[in-house]
């Protein structure tokens, strides 16, 4: 109708899950198989009143879907990585991926690669957060606490089983993972960030993305077909600030 889009700044707040209280959730994957596609558009409905940040991703052959679930929890941030496998015209939901700690904290940013025979996934897990209620205002100190408590997890899928491993364990921000694979080999790369100081509250002219002046690198770990090798640095930040990363793997295992 000619109206311009307008940005509404609600400030820095924790996640609001009122949608779980205001409307029921209908998961069409709980019945072991989704509904067949509608003839009109070929679309398949996976969930009603779904988690707004589920951000589903597919493996390279489409045989598996991974997504973030809010764990049906309206009161606590207990995001978990879930997966579903291709079943005819739909998908069968298989539940969440177990971690070594089995910690129901805030999983985000899941990525996937591979096939039904060898699949790989990586994501960010929020290991700690300030004691805040839902939809509560946070300051930059709170954000700094959350950033420094982010870790990368990687998982390999073979013989109908996911095996998950924590890939980082430190006090810096590990974020934005990517994953690429070829057969039973894979690479997970991510950004590793830290700052000497956070922006000052009330200073809207300060950009938090430009504050990572102490460390702004790209790290990676290789899965060699049996285990995850030790972390290495792909880029140390000496040639400029990292803004985005991607990864790819050739059939011989060469990684980009």
Image (cartoon, rainbow, N blue to C red):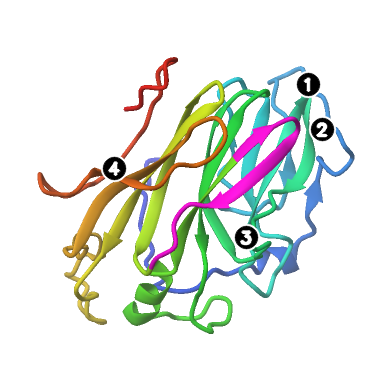
Q: Residue at point 85% right, 44% down?
A: 30
Observer-side mark, 1 or 3, equals 3
Give the residue number, with chain letter if any, for mark 3: 79
Give the mark nearest the N terminus, 3 or 2.
Answer: 2
- The quarter of the image holding the C terminus is top left
Left or right of residue 115, residue 11 in this image = left
The local secondary structure at tag 3 comes to loop
Give the mark nearest the N terminus, 4 or 1.
Answer: 1
Q: Tell me the number on the disc at residue 89.
A: 1
- Magenta extent: 156-170
Residue 205's x, y, as percent? 17, 70
Q: Quadrant of residue 34?
A: top right
Residue 128's x, y, as percent? 51, 74
Give the mark nearest the N terminus, 2 or 1.
Answer: 2
Secondary structure mostly taken by the magenta-highlighted segment of the chain? strand
Cα distance in 3D space between marks 4 and 2: 35 Å
Cα distance in 3D space between marks 3 and 2: 23 Å
Residue 26's x, y, as percent? 81, 49
- The quarter of the image holding the N terminus is top left
Give the mark nearest the N terminus, 4 or 2.
Answer: 2
Cα distance in 3D space between marks 4 and 1: 35 Å
Front residue (pair 40, 215): 215
Q: Tell me the number on the disc at residue 34.
A: 2
Give the mark nearest the N terminus, 3 or 4.
Answer: 3
Q: Tell me the number on the disc at residue 244.
A: 4
Cα distance in 3D space between marks 3 and 4: 24 Å
């Amino acid at each position: 109708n000619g109206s311009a889009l307008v940005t509404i700044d609600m400030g820095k707040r924790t996640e609001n899950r009122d949608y779980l209280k205001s409307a029921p959730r209908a998961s069409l994957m709980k019945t072991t198989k989704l509904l067949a596609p509608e003839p009109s558009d070929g679309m398949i409905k996976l969930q009603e009143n779904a988690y707004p940040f589920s951000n589903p991703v597919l493996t390279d052959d489409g045989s598996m879907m991974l997504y973030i679930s809010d764990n049906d929890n309206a009161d606590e941030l207990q995001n978990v990585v879930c997966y579903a496998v291709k079943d005819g015209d739909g998908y069968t939901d298989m539940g969440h991926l177990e971690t070594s700690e089995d910690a129901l904290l805030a999983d985000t940013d899941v990525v996937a690669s591979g096939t039904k025979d060898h699949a790989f996934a990586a994501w960010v897990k929020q290991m700690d957060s300030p004691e805040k209620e839902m939809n509560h205002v946070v300051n930059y100190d709170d954000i700094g606490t959350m950033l420094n408590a982010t870790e990368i997890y990687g998982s390999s899928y073979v013989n109908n089983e996911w095996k998950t491993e924590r890939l980082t364990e430190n006090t810096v921000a590990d974020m934005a993972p990517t994953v690429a694979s070829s057969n039973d080999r894979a690479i997970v790369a991510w950004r590793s960030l830290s700052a000497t100081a956070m922006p000052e509250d009330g200073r809207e002219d300060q950009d938090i993305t430009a504050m990572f002046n102490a460390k702004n690198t790209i790290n990676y770990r290789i899965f060699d077909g049996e285990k995850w090798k030790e972390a290495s640095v792909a880029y140390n930040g000496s040639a400029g600030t990292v803004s985005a990363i991607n990864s790819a793997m050739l059939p011989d295992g060469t990684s980009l």
